[in-house]
Amino acid sequence: MYWQVNAIVNDKIDKISLLLKNSKKTGIQKMYHKEMIQMISNFKKNPIKFKKPQTPKIPDGSPIGSD
């Protein structure tokens, strides 16, 4: 494993988590931040079990309204 890459990624993840924790956002955005903090925490506890959320597949073809 590349320990240098792990060090950089872990540092960035910690900075993102701290940024989210210190955010002054309220309402829905605050809920999103809490969920992201939880996802980071789960990843840090057990990175092997972490699963990236599924994203919907973009349909084939041109976007609507394009020429």
Image (cartoon, rainbow, N blue to C red):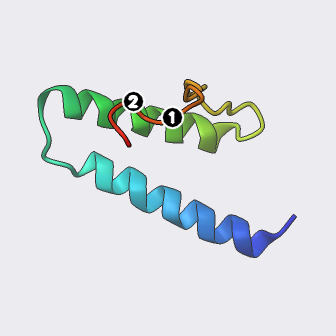
Q: Left or right: where does residue 24 sit relative to residue 56?
A: left
Q: Left or right: where does residue 2 sit relative to residue 13?
A: right
The CA span between labels 2 and 1 is: 6 Å
Report the residue marked by disc 2.
35
Identify the residue shown where x is 56% and y is 28%. Answer: 55
Q: How would you rate the neighbour count of disc 1 (Cα within 10 Å): few for under 14, some for 14-19, many for 20 or more? A: some
Image coords of residue 16 (percent x, y) = 40, 56
Image coords of residue 23 (percent x, y) = 20, 49
Report the residue marked by disc 1.
39
Tell me, yes or no, whether the two marked residues, 2 and 1, touch with CB atoms within 8 Å: yes
The part of the image, by quadrant, that contains residue 30 is top left
Q: Left or right: where does residue 51 sit relative to residue 42?
A: right
Identify the residue shown where x is 37% and y is 40%. Answer: 66
Identify the residue shown where x is 14% and y is 41%. Answer: 25
Image coords of residue 34 (percent x, y) = 33, 32
Badge 1 amino acid: Met
Looking at the rendered image, the quarter that the N terminus falls into is bottom right
> In the image as oriented, which residue stretches furthest toward the right?
1
The part of the image, by quadrant, that contains residue 7 is bottom right
Image coords of residue 2 (percent x, y) = 82, 69
Compared with 28, 6 (above or below) is: below
Badge 2 amino acid: Glu
> In the image as oriented, which residue stretches furthest toward the bottom?
4
Secondary structure of the residue carrying numbered label 1: helix
